[in-house]
Image: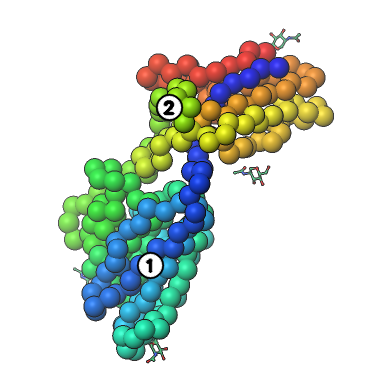
């Protein structure tokens, strides 16, 4: 039996209650969301409040700011006649900490920069909210960069990297964690109460780890229990799943390996 300490991509933040963020859509007749972005955690709610005119809150991808995302959310058109105390609203429930890109689908609005984001990477990331809005304006709401007004080039997709961080826990214990990260990944968070996660390797002769994924915090332990046959548990990077981290890292990270 081998025990290892793992750093994980997604970490839960203990002790934080879910929050609701009000976002005004088209307040004051402006083609804008206000605030223009929110930083939110899983379980939080974004409450879009629609002001007069006829707007939407529609999810898009970063690369096509003015095109509805196939699996994304969409309030649909919400026409509002007068400013009053009971404006219509639409709720988006935050599921994870990944960036969520949003625009207004009314003709001409996205091309004028009417966009919004949940958890956008900060400047100077190529995937910042400013870059998203510039792309919406450059493509004039068409979703095609061929019609771009300027010479704007589409920023690259988020780049996955292997990061190493040192984290100090509540008890003063210090942990070094190596994990796959991208621009905007939240910082690793120490566990309030470290726990042990047990993983069965190759149970019932199956070629699998069970469970195959866990949510864990810095300071937790993962214990791998090996069943018959001849397996390993070896850390890799996200982009090279079948190679030991040491053989693909360009910055000297080693990662853990049980050996056969
Ligand atoms: C709202 O806008 C949509 C799309 O332009 C349009 O189909 C719809 O008729 C508009 N609704 C009102 C009440 O103006
Ligand atoms: C307030 O505006 C909404 C949306 O236009 C409308 O449905 C509602 O009747 C209005 N309420 C009052 C009191 O005017
Ligand atoms: C941008 O889009 C708007 C609305 O779709 C259109 O009226 C306008 O002609 C477009 N401008 C350019 C430069 O293509
Ligand atoms: C993680 O495991 C849970 C339960 O074992 C499963 O329901 C879920 O689909 C898994 N998630 C991923 C991303 O594989
Ligand atoms: C386990 O697998 C490795 C790699 O295939 C092999 O070198 C080793 O001999 C195996 N051990 C046993 C006991 O089968």
Q: Position of residue 40 (x, y in %)?
A: 42, 53
**In the image, what residue occupies the spot 62% across and 15% down?**
258
The C terminus: image quadrant: top right
**In the image, what residue occupies the spot 58% across and 16% down?**
257
Mark 1 neighbour density, 10 Å: few (under 14) some (14–19) many (20 or more): some
**Quadrant of residue 195 within the rendered picture:** top right
Closer-to-camera residue (103/120)? 120
Name the residue that disc number 1 marks: 22
Q: In the image as oriented, which residue stretches furthest toward the right?
A: 204
Q: Dividing the image into four quarters, tell me where ligand 5 lies.
A: top right
**In the image, what residue occupies the spot 63% across and 19% down?**
3
Tell me: residue 151, above or below residue 124. below
Name the residue that disc number 2 marks: 168
Tell me: residue 44, above or below residue 229. below
Q: Which mark is residue 128?
A: none
Q: Position of residue 104 (x, y in %)?
A: 34, 70
**Closer to us: mark 2 or mark 1?**
2
Tell me: residue 127, above or below residue 49. above
* 3D distance between C-alphas at marks 2 and 1: 34 Å
The N terminus: image quadrant: top right
């Amino acid at each position: 039996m081998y025990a290892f300490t793992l750093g994980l991509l997604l970490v839960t933040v203990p002790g934080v209650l879910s929050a609701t963020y009000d976002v005004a859509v088209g307040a004051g007749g402006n083609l804008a969301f206000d605030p223009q972005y929110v930083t939110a955690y899983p379980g939080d709610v974004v409450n879009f409040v629609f002001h007069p005119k006829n707007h939407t809150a529609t999810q898009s991808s970063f690369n096509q700011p003015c095109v509805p995302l196939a699996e994304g959310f969409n309030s649909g058109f919400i026409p509002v006649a007068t400013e009053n105390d009971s404006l219509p609203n639409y709720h988006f429930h935050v599921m994870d900490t990944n960036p969520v890109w949003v625009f207004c689908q009314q003709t001409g609005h996205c091309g004028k920069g009417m966009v919004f984001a949940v958890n956008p990477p900060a400047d100077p990331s190529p995937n910042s909210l400013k870059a998203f809005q510039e792309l919406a304006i450059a493509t004039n709401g068409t979703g095609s960069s061929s019609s771009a007004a300027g010479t704007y080039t589409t920023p690259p997709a988020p780049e996955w990297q292997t990061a190493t961080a040192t984290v100090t826990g509540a008890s003063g214990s210090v942990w070094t964690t190596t994990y796959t990260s991208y621009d905007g990944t939240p910082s690793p968070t120490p566990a309030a109460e470290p726990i042990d996660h047990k993983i069965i390797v190759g149970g019932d002769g199956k070629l699998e780890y069970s469970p195959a994924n866990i949510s864990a915090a810095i300071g937790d332990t993962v214990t791998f229990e090996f069943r018959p046959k001849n397996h390993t548990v070896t850390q890799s990077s996200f982009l090279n799943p079948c190679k030991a981290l040491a053989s693909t890292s360009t910055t000297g990270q080693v990662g853990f390996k049980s050996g056969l």
